[in-house]
Amino acid sequence: MRPILSERQLQEVMIQFWTDHFNIDQSKGDCRWLKVWDDRKVIRKHALGKFPELLRTSALSPAMLWYLDGRKNVKENQEDRPNENYTRELFELHTLGVHGGYTQDDVEQVARRLTGWRVQGRKSGNFYASNIGKVGFRKDLHDDGEKKILDWVVPAGLGKGDLDRVLDIVSLHPSTAKHIATKLCIRFIADEPPQDAVSTVAVSFQRSGGDICRILHTLFQTDQFQDNRGNKFKRPFNFLVSSLRATGATINQTNDSWHLDHHPLGKYFLRMGDAPFQYPTPDGYPQEISPWLCTLLWCWDFALKLSQNEIESIKIDKQ
């Protein structure tokens, strides 16, 4: 309903972009309800803010700590090895990119740095409803030794400050600037983004300290964006939303129809594999056209039935 009704359409586009960038599958454990908090307090709050702040908030999101097992990354004994799930995606997906210049040793070193962060769960004998989902740091479960990360030596004894030091290094790294710039240019210009535009946007990323509004302003001023406006293929979610906006459709909801399985619009999202918060792997829904070509028949079916008022609970004024 927000993408359909909002007057701040660029914000909604960027909310979708960052939701995919920091993807969390709602079907994993407590992510079922923690992702709702993440959507409001992480993605929506920072979608047009500063990338370093968005990255830090995501890193400490209870939903992200659940989804990528950050809550399991602890060091209780000398023999314990850190859980690398979140760190690997932090490098490969969230910041530097797969070719960003990091090594397996960097992954291991950063995983050590990020030990000790926990999410309050439903433990028998220690259940307080007001604490469920809260994030906290356990110094006794943290590896507080010296580490070397991307040629930076991070001293021992920083405690929970290790997280900030790691994110300071990666959030504005040149590889991060290029990775984010590439993804933005794919989203707004073309599946094969022109390298001149990518370079221009990457420079803006670094000069602005990751200011998302300034980065987007730079992107929209490029000749490549101006020349390719309106040429991007719409994935199913965007096609359905823009169809409803363009036709001024009225969507009637009842108390039992809010679930995706029960509402006709939700059923289309599920059939076409583009339902919110349900992409199963950390890389998020693809932006390129090729994975979505198999949904064209469903899009045409939706458009035809919408135009004839044949979709239950959704009506348009054909006059």
Image (tube, rainbow, N blue to C red):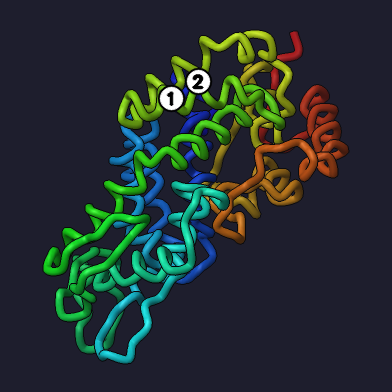
The reply to whether residue 30 is visible in this rendering is: no
Q: Quadrant of residue 299?
A: top right
| Quadrant hosting residue 119 | bottom left
Residue at x-position 65% and y-position 54%: 261
| Residue found at the very far right of the displayed protein | 297
Q: Is residue 158 above or below residue 9?
A: below
Residue type at tag 2? Thr
Give the distance between the C-alpha atoms of the residues marked 1 and 2, in whole angstroms. 5 Å
Q: Residue at x 68, y 45 (%)?
A: 269
> The residue under label 1 is which amino acid type?
Val
Task: Give neighbour class at mark 2: few <14, some 14-19, many 20+ (Cα, 10 Å).
Answer: some
Q: Is residue 47 visible?
A: yes
Name of the residue lying farthest toward the front: 151
Q: Who's the residue at 80% across and 40% down the image?
A: 290
Instruction: Locate residue 289: give its quadrant.
Output: top right
**Horizontal placement of 190 versus 305: left or right?**
left
Q: Position of residue 205 (x, y in %)?
A: 40, 28
In the drawing, what numbered circle is on residue 234? Answer: none
Residue 203 numbered mark, or none: 1
Residue holding disc 2: 200
Question: 259 or 20: which is nearer to us?
Answer: 20
Q: Position of residue 59 (x, y in %)?
A: 34, 55
Check if mark 1's residue and mark 2's residue have beta carbons within 8 Å: yes
- Seen from the viewer's position, the closer of residues 57 and 181 is 181
Q: Position of residue 264 (x, y in %)?
A: 69, 43
